[in-house]
Image (spheres, rainbow, N blue to C red):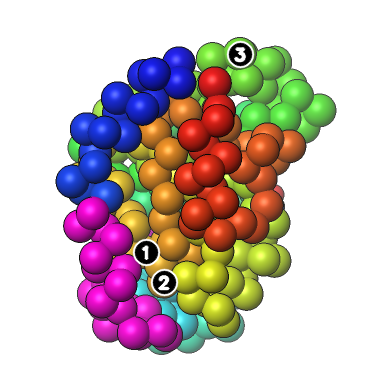
Amino acid sequence: MRKDRRRFLRTVGATAVVLASQSLARPPGAAAAVSGRKRIGIVGSGRVGGTLGAVWVGAGHEVMFSSRHVENDRALAARLGRGARAGTPREAAAFGEVLMISVPYHALPDVGQALEDLLDGRVVIDTCNPFVSRDGEIATWARAKGAGLASAELLPGARIVRAFNAVGYMRMGAAHERPGRFGMPIAGDDLEAVEIVSPLIRDIGYEPVLIGGLESGRHLMPGTPLAGERTPEEIRRIAATLE
Ligand SMILES: NC(=O)c1ccc[n+]([C@@H]2O[C@H](COP(=O)([O-])OP(=O)(O)OC[C@H]3O[C@@H](n4cnc5c(N)ncnc54)[C@H](OP(=O)(O)O)[C@@H]3O)[C@@H](O)[C@H]2O)c1
């Protein structure tokens, strides 16, 4: 396993250099100015979706919030003002150049089915974590398979980048105050998708650190060695020891 990840990371080395140089070129606080204004759809506008969406709106992006209760999303969008809007999950998926899915894991099969025809080729940030106590049987299956590979099976065709999985949502909301101090471990097989998502992670305040392909997504969970806020260097060091 460790060898597979090393091989993957060697292959992506060139991309990592490009990403790193982009990060060095970025003046602190110049979030959306560097990443360029993006349309971001969010399915699941709770603690994580609402928090990250608000920071992206603040950075100048266009964000559409969605859930099963559009009235809540409308109220959130109204509070955030310009740049924020509300819609159904299908509208958010169609709207977003990038789609973030941030729902309890047990809701992922429904979300995958509802968006089935919209997912193919779509860049998706997956924040979702399987917990048996909350999500039941599907969490047992997802934990055995590995959260990244399980999400890929539930969201067929999506170009998934697993991110924002093992940091509390309140920390995520404050990270932009000290941009780049902490890293955000991410996992994904599609390097173009990683490149598209990385500037958005910087806009939240974290330096993205690719730890491997989706198979490594299982390491991005609360309770794993990578959980919590760590410097990019610490994340790389820990990731190198993971089986
Ligand atoms: N909380 C954290 O600090 C944290 C940190 C990292 C990762 N995560 C993970 O990220 C995910 C979201 O966590 P959260 O804390 O933000 O959860 P949350 O506060 O409970 O929010 C979940 C959101 O998903 C919506 N939702 C539920 N079922 C849905 C469905 N079938 N279709 C569309 N929307 C649906 C909910 O709204 P409606 O019920 O109105 O539809 C709500 O807006 C979870 O998998 C969690 O494990 C959480």
The amino acid type of the residue labelled 1 equals Leu
Secondary structure of the residue carrying tag 3 is: helix
Secondary structure of the residue carrying tag 1 is: helix
Residue behind label 3 places its C-beta within 8 angstroms of ligand 1: no
Residue 66's spot in the image, x, y percent? 49, 56
Q: Is residue 55 above or below residue 228?
A: below
Instruction: State the residue position of label 1.
Output: 200
Residue at left 47%, top 28%?
Answer: 216
In three-dimensional space, the C-alpha distance between marks 2 and 3, rounded to whole angstroms, equals 33 Å
- Asked if disc 1 and disc 2 are in contact, CB closer than 8 Å, the reply is yes
Secondary structure of the residue carrying tag 2 is: helix
Q: Quadrant of residue 13?
A: top left
Residue 177's spot in the image, x, y percent? 57, 81
Instruction: State the residue position of label 2.
Output: 203
Task: Specify start and end residues of the magenta stretch as a single range.
Answer: 17-42
The amino acid type of the residue labelled 3 equals Ala
Question: Is 23 in the magenta?
Answer: yes
In three-dimensional space, the C-alpha distance between marks 3 and 1, rounded to whole angstroms, equals 30 Å
Residue 138's spot in the image, x, y percent? 63, 19
